[in-house]
Structures are given as structure tokens and as C-alpha cells.
């Protein structure tokens, strides 16, 4: 059997936008995103070289309008389910957590609420949090190599941060996802 030397291959960067979750076991892939008050959770299973990142806008809906891809309560489950579908061992999952800035003094503490939700979710699911950079007034750029579970977080000028979208309106079709 021939061994492929991936060090000779160019790294592939994939932007993870609001409302997305991406999972991979490709050693060439690097997931990247820019966060303001949003949260990105990077999960990985080092024993199986599988990892993924999500990017959510709000922790959960403020009313009973339903879930969609903008909410952490939905995207955290999507990320875990995708990791398991790729062959990750749930007992081996580890997490990095980034974002949750409160970038405007006159705004509500959305970033803080997002970070508290994500931290509580990981704790409730029994997933150890190995590193985090949350809160404060500044935006962040996150690069994550899912195959290796390596993450890099840099503070960026707030003018480069994405403008947070207004509270999303739920869609009619929410798809199939198992919340547990």
C-alpha cells in the first residue's frame, strides 16, 4: 500500500459562515471564521483524526418560534451528530470555544449569553473544554485544523468583524435532527 505524503499538498482553507457546521478528517483542511458576538465551537477526536467547527449567532430562540441554523442549541447538536457520522468516538471529543464578544457598550450582552450557553452545553454533554477565548470587546479570527485538533485564535480590529445579523426568523422546514 502506498503512503501519501500530505505535506506536499497545498493546505485547503474553508470559511465557516454564520449558521454553518463543517466536519472533516482531511489533514490538508483548515477551517476559518471571523467572530464578533457569535460563537465558534471547534470539536475534535484526536484518536480518530476528525474535527469540526460551527458558527452560531444566538444561543436559542427568544420565543417558541422554532429552531434553525442560526441558533447554538441547533448547531451544537448538528456538529456532534456530524462528528459521530464521520466516525468520531463521543467519549474522545474535546472542544475549543471562541467568540462571544460584547462589541458595543450600548448593546445587550449577547456575546456573554452565547459564551455561557456554549460552556454550559459542553459541560452538560460531558465534553471537556481544552481552550477558550471568549468575551471582551474585540472580534476574533479563528483557524482550526480538524485532523489535528489544532486551533489558533487572533484578536482582530473590530472594523473587520462581520456585522451581526438581526434575530433570524424561523424557516418553515427545520429538517431532521435529533436533539438529545
Image: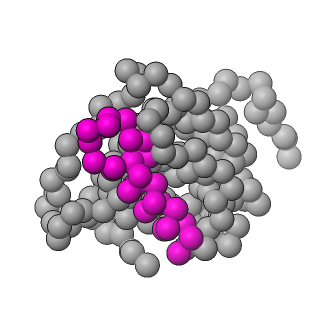
* Residue 22 appears in view: no
Q: Residue 164, located in which quarter of the rendered image?
A: top left
Rendered residue at 52%/46% (across/down)? 134
Is 124 located above or below residue 40 in the figure?
below
Image coordinates of residue 19 in percent, x first then y, are: 34, 48
Between 123 and 143, which is closer to the camera in this rendering?
A: 123
Q: Which quarter of the rendering shows the C terminus?
A: bottom left
Determine the residue located farthest toward the front in the rendered image: 105
Image coordinates of residue 83 in percent, x first then y, are: 56, 61
* Residue 77 appears in view: yes
Left or right: 31 with respect to 67? right
Image coordinates of residue 93 in percent, x first then y, are: 65, 64
**Does the magenta-highlighted stretch encompass residue 116?**
yes
Q: Main secondary structure of the magenta part?
A: helix
Between 151 and 114, which is closer to the camera in this rendering?
A: 114
Left or right: 119 with respect to 57? right
Counting the numbered discs, the total is 0
Is 104 located above or below residue 119 in the figure?
above
Between 44 and 120, which is closer to the camera in this rendering?
A: 120
Rendered residue at 70%/43% (across/down)? 150
**Does the magenta-highlighted stretch encompass residue 109?**
yes
Give the residues drawn in magenta, as a range. 100-124
Amino acid at each position: 500500500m502506498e503512503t501519501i505524503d500530505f505535506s506536499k499538498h497545498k493546505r485547503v482553507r474553508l470559511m465557516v459562515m454564520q449558521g454553518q457546521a463543517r466536519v472533516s478528517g482531511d489533514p490538508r483542511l483548515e477551517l476559518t471564521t471571523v467572530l464578533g458576538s457569535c460563537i465558534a465551537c471547534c470539536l475534535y477526536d484526536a484518536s480518530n483524526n476528525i474535527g469540526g467547527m460551527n458558527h452560531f449567532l444566538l444561543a436559542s430562540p427568544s420565543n417558541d418560534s422554532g429552531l434553525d441554523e442560526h441558533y447554538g442549541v441547533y448547531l451544537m447538536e448538528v456538529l456532534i451528530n456530524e462528528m459521530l457520522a464521520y466516525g468520531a468516538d463521543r467519549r474522545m471529543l474535546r472542544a475549543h470555544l471562541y467568540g462571544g464578544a460584547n462589541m458595543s457598550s450600548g448593546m445587550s450582552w449577547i456575546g456573554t449569553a452565547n459564551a455561557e450557553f456554549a460552556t454550559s452545553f459542553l459541560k452538560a454533554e460531558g465534553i471537556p473544554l481544552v481552550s477558550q477565548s471568549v468575551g471582551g470587546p474585540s472580534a476574533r479570527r479563528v483557524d482550526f485544523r480538524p485532523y489535528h485538533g489544532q486551533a489558533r485564535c487572533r484578536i482582530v480590529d473590530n472594523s473587520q468583524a462581520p456585522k451581526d445579523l438581526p434575530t433570524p426568523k424561523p424557516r418553515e422546514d427545520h429538517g431532521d435532527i435529533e436533539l438529545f
